[in-house]
Amino acid sequence: MPTATQEAPPAERNGTDLHRSPRLLRYLTLVMAAVLLLGVGWTAATLTANRTPGDESAEAGFARDMSRHHAQAVEMAMIAYAKGQDPAIRQLGYDMALTQQAQIGHMQRWLQEWDLLPTGTRPAMEWMPDAVPVGPDGLMPGMATREEITQLHEAQGAAVDQLFVKLMIKHHLGGVHMADGLLKVSDRAEVVRMAEAMKQTQQKEINELRRMGLADG
């Protein structure tokens, strides 16, 4: 039988120390609170990232408008590929058409996954924070007029190269502007990645077209 001078068993000492240590209790409480906050923050971030864009969202507007913008670029690029005189122009037209047609496919698939129609009810470009009014015939920034497209179809030889370079530089500048607009307002990963890729590729192609020295000829 233990005497008054004997130590208490370890289990009793631990329980007594815990109850007599308010500092330890405060520490454990803070740790538990931090874990709970991290869990709540992770859940909120996950829900935000997974939220499907709505019909009037910037992501939906970007996908719809950029698909139409790209479609015209594909048309012009295929004319350059078919009729261009300079082999470099023809190759660039081919590459542009493949790239932008593939991107149209991605954007249209997003709209299907989001259960949205390919076209919306809002006017073009209204999704942008600093929306630029569309031009004649509802043309978005950089887009060629139907008259310019007709001229490109009817051009021959070196005139095809020259007009293509002029129109595509303007078209790409408009596309970069639209990509920048999306990047200002969206944090949806796949859309942001696409906009960044478009901006990088089109700026590179603008520089390449300018180096050809045909835009002002």
Image: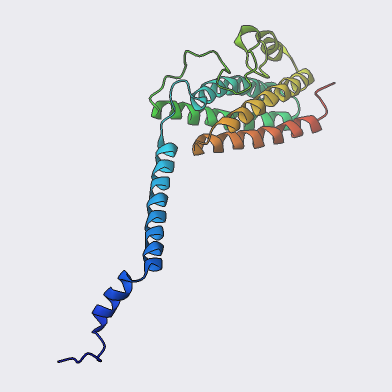
Position above or below: 148 against 20: above
Q: Name the image quarter holding residue 33.
A: bottom left
Look at 44% across and 26% down and name the residue there: 111
Q: Nearer the viewer, residue 190 or 129?
A: 129
Q: Quadrant of the C terminus?
A: top right
Left or right placement of residue 3 versus residue 175 in this view = left
Position above or below: 20 against 54: below
| Colour scheme of the rendered structure | rainbow
The spot of residue 83 in percent (x, y) is 69, 21
The spot of residue 196 in percent (x, y) is 60, 37
Left or right placement of residue 19 versus residue 146 in this view = left
Q: Nearer the viewer, residue 163 or 193?
A: 193
Q: Quadrant of the N terminus?
A: bottom left
Q: Name the image quarter holding residue 215.
A: top right
Q: Name the image quarter holding residue 128.
A: top right
Look at 73% across and 25% down and name the residue there: 169
The mark total stands at 0
User: Which residue in the rendered view is the most extreme toward the front?
Assistant: 4
Look at 39% across and 39% down and name the residue there: 47
The spot of residue 18 in percent (x, y) is 32, 71
